[in-house]
Image (spheres, rainbow, N blue to C red):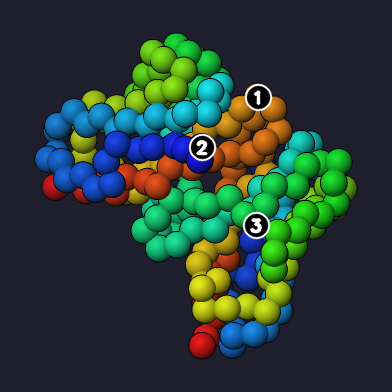
Amino acid sequence: DVKVTQSSRYLVKRTGEKVFLECVQDMDHENMFWYRQDPGLGLRLIYFSYDVKMKEKGDIPEGYSVSREKKERFSLILESASTNQTSMYLCASSSQGNDGYTFGSGTRLTVV
Amino acid sequence: KQEVTQIPAALSVPEGENLVLNCSFTDSAIYNLQWFRQDPGKGLTSLLLIQSSQREQTSGRLNASLDKSSGRSTLYIAASQPGDSATYLCAPPIDDKIIFGKGTRLHILP
């Protein structure tokens, strides 16, 4: 069963901490994505990557960075967590072909 | 920029009814369209993927259609069940990225 795995289901971090959210896929997909989801705002794209060491800004990249050192792993980094980054974070992957997107189960991050 | 609208935003129907969820998008230069289901607090589960060369796709009680020229897709759910209660999202990709609508929140009454 192909999978996108997000390392943490729930996280609680303090304001100012550096936070790493990890995502791993086992489908040899080229493309990987990070979204955040907030009530009333839907899913918004933060960053995406089409290849190892490549990254592109999505619609709301401010306050975030990403790392893709290996094809299967895409990390989202909150350099200095703030309370307005409390949200559900969802990782997804896709191939260069037309076989659709696969999502992880999400990480619920609370910044206090 | 791709904009996605889903109507209705919320829907409550008695168990057993057939229902239709609507999705419209502004940029028709898509190569496929995917429908997802999301249960509260969970990730997204793919339901159906329609390629641009297809007009519809079926899986069990679900049928999705795609009309690229008019920028519309519909998800038809037959004989609805309480377990169908969830939020349904359509996702037409553009430039290898998917932009989501706000979804339709569906509640099936037992």
The image shows residue A57 at horizontal and vertical percentages of: 48, 25
Q: Chain of mark 1?
A: A
Q: Are marks 3 and 2 on the same chain?
A: no
Q: Which residue is mark 1?
A: A96
Disc number placed over residue B57 in the picture, else none = none
Q: Chain of mark 2?
A: A
| Circles 2 and 1: CB atoms closer than 8 Å | no
Q: Which residue is mark 3?
A: B5
In the depicted structure, whether residue B30 falls above or below residue A72: below
Q: Is residue B5 left or right of residue B63?
A: left
Q: Nearer the viewer, mark 1 or mark 3?
A: 1
Q: Nearer the viewer, mark 2 or mark 1?
A: 2
Question: What's the amino acid at mark 2?
Answer: Val
Q: Secondary structure at mark 1?
A: loop
* Dot placed on the residue nearer the N-terminal end, 2 or 1: 2
Label 2 CA crowd tier, 10 Å (few <14, some 14–19, many 20+): few
Q: Chain of mark 3?
A: B
Label 1 CA crowd tier, 10 Å (few <14, some 14–19, many 20+): few
Question: What's the amino acid at mark 1?
Answer: Gln
The image shows residue B32 at horizontal and vertical percentages of: 74, 41
Number of residue marks: 3
The image shows residue A62 at horizontal and vertical percentages of: 36, 30
Q: Is residue A32 left or right of residue B13?
A: left
Label 3 CA crowd tier, 10 Å (few <14, some 14–19, many 20+): some
Disc number placed over residue A2 in the picture, else none = 2
Q: Which residue is depicted at the point 35% across and 38% down?
A: A6
Q: Which residue is depicted at the point 52% across and 79% down?
A: B82
Q: Secondary structure at mark 2?
A: loop
Residue A34 seen from this side:
yes
Q: Are marks 1 and 3 on the same chain?
A: no
Real-space CA distance between mark 3 and mark 2, rounded to the nearest whole angstrom: 30 Å
Instruction: Please identify the quarter of the rendering in which residue B104 is found.
Output: bottom right
